[in-house]
Image (cartoon, grey):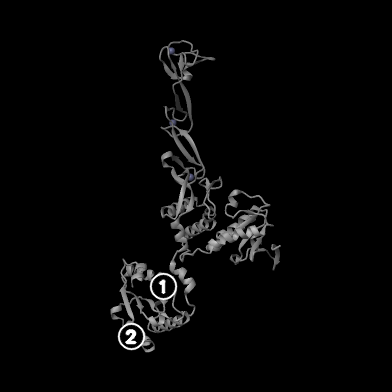
Amino acid sequence: MLNVLRNNEAKQTLSAQGHELLVVFRKSDLPKDWAQYAGIVVNTDSEKTLLEIVKKVRCKQDISSLIPLFVNELHTFQEELLSHTDGKVHIAQVDTIVKRAIRINKRLNQIITPLNLSAYEVQIQFKTLSFLYSRKSLLTPFTSRKSKIGYYFPMLSLWNGDDSLGILKALEAMQHGGLIAGVFKDHIHLCKNCSGNYLNFKEICPSCHDADIQARDMIHHFVCAHVAPEDDFKKGDHLSCPKCDKKLRHIGIDYDKPSAIFSCNSCTNEFQNPQIQAACFDCEKENSLSELLQKTIGEYSITAKGEQWLLNYDTSIKEEKHSRPPSLKGISFPIFKLMARQELKRVAAIGTQSTLGSIAFQSNEIEFFNSDMKTAIQVEMEKIIQSYLTDVDLLYSEAYNKFYFLLPDTLASNCERLEQIRYNLSKLLTDNLTGTMPVVMHTHQLKKEDEIDLLLNTL
Ligand SMILES: [Zn+2]
Ligand SMILES: [Zn+2]
Ligand SMILES: [Zn+2]
């Protein structure tokens, strides 16, 4: 039997196939580094405790919020709460739980976290897409009185709290961007003032807008063609025509009721068609039907484009993770790009003159060296370049033979340092190698309409 329930420094874990699941009874059982476990199994019968745990895990900013999170099937909880988890499990069937966790983790591990995750919209988009991708599931809303808009979304409703309209807007934006695809489920109508959907629809007087109105049937007497409200025909316990005095006998034979007439108890106005109005229970605002905000509720899935966004969020970051030699002192590519974009904003705002440039060379000789040798050369080259840069200049070394630099408030045309860098690198290479091509330097003065990604590709 591989399944072991272990008490490990007061932490309970379940193990199978070399994977460990953390068993959590209360919120305080959650360690900071829960991501080191293959998954979490919540074992509580308290709805409050489960909600606390689910919130703490799922509301974390990063991808660790999407760790496989199961609930002991012995306990009963509302669908709403369970929708944020990966469902119920039989706690004795550890192999099955671990298998499910592995499936999810495999896909979570492929996901690249975006740099600007602190931006709220990016975070919601990233976590929604990550959830859809890692669970290979649909985002299916369900009706709920607890939701202000009447529909509840797994995960999203947890992250957005009371901002239900914010959820719909985030989904609309993702659908618009082609990252998710939606299948129509329902239309909802929301209060123009507070976006609530707890509305009271009622008929009102078109004149004074009071709801204290009364409908009365109209009677059409066939014999004399008299038409009047039913009250006018009432005489004791029978109906009699006020015009021709004849007793009315059978509906459909000597009279009928062609329509109703409304009268207002507030202003005595009489009318055929009352207006419809929706009063909001939450903010008490009255809405005419045309004023209500109509929104579409859909069931969503991730598209190929969405997967691409998620998995290659920034190819450079992906490569960075795997290939950047630790001995390099320069900054990483994402940071370099970020700073370059920042510099571009300065150029646009205050018109500073700044330079973006690259240094490159080709060497067939170095190309045949092993990767350690190449890294050593890259570190050496980086050192030489850095020695000519000032504190505000930035350098990114992409490979032993390709470097990018950013010189704020500096024009290449009157920057002697650049020529010195080029000369010294050429000297180093020609002194040590045979058949080295010259060091090529490209520079570009930043203009406000520039695109950093484009520039870095062409420099
Ligand atoms: Zn309202
Ligand atoms: Zn009225
Ligand atoms: Zn009559």
Residue 270: image quadrant is top left
Ligand 3 image-quadrant field: top left
Looking at mark 1, is its residue's CB closer than 8 Å to ligand 1? no
Q: Secondary structure at mark 2?
A: helix
Q: Which residue is mark 1?
A: 336
Counting from the top left corner in percent of width and height, residue 386 is at 40, 82
Q: Residue furthest bottom?
A: 431
Residue that badge 2 annotates: 423
> Can you tell which of label 2 and label 1 is closer to the viewer?
2
Amino acid at pointer 1: Phe
- The CA span between labels 2 and 1 is 24 Å
**Viewer-nearest residue: 72 or 343:** 72
Q: Which of the pair 297/167 is nearer the observer?
A: 297
Mark 2 or mark 1: name the one nearer the start of the chain.
1
Neighbor class of circle 2 (other Cα within 10 Å; few <14, some 14-19, many 20+) is: few
Give the tally of numbered discs. Answer: 2
From the viewer's perspective, is 28 left or right of 348? right
274 vs 114: above or below: above
Residue 216 visible to an observer of this rendering: yes
**Which of the 4 image quarters holds residue 8?**
bottom right
Horizontal placement of 401 versus 49: left or right?
A: left
> What is the three-letter code of the residue carrying label 2?
Tyr
Quadrant in which the N terminus is drawn:
bottom right
In the displayed image of the protein, which residue is found farthest to the left? 413
**Dot 1 alpha-carbon crowd within 10 angstroms: few under 14, some 14 to 19, many 20 or more:** some
Q: Which mark is residue 454?
A: none
Q: Quadrant of the C terminus?
A: bottom left
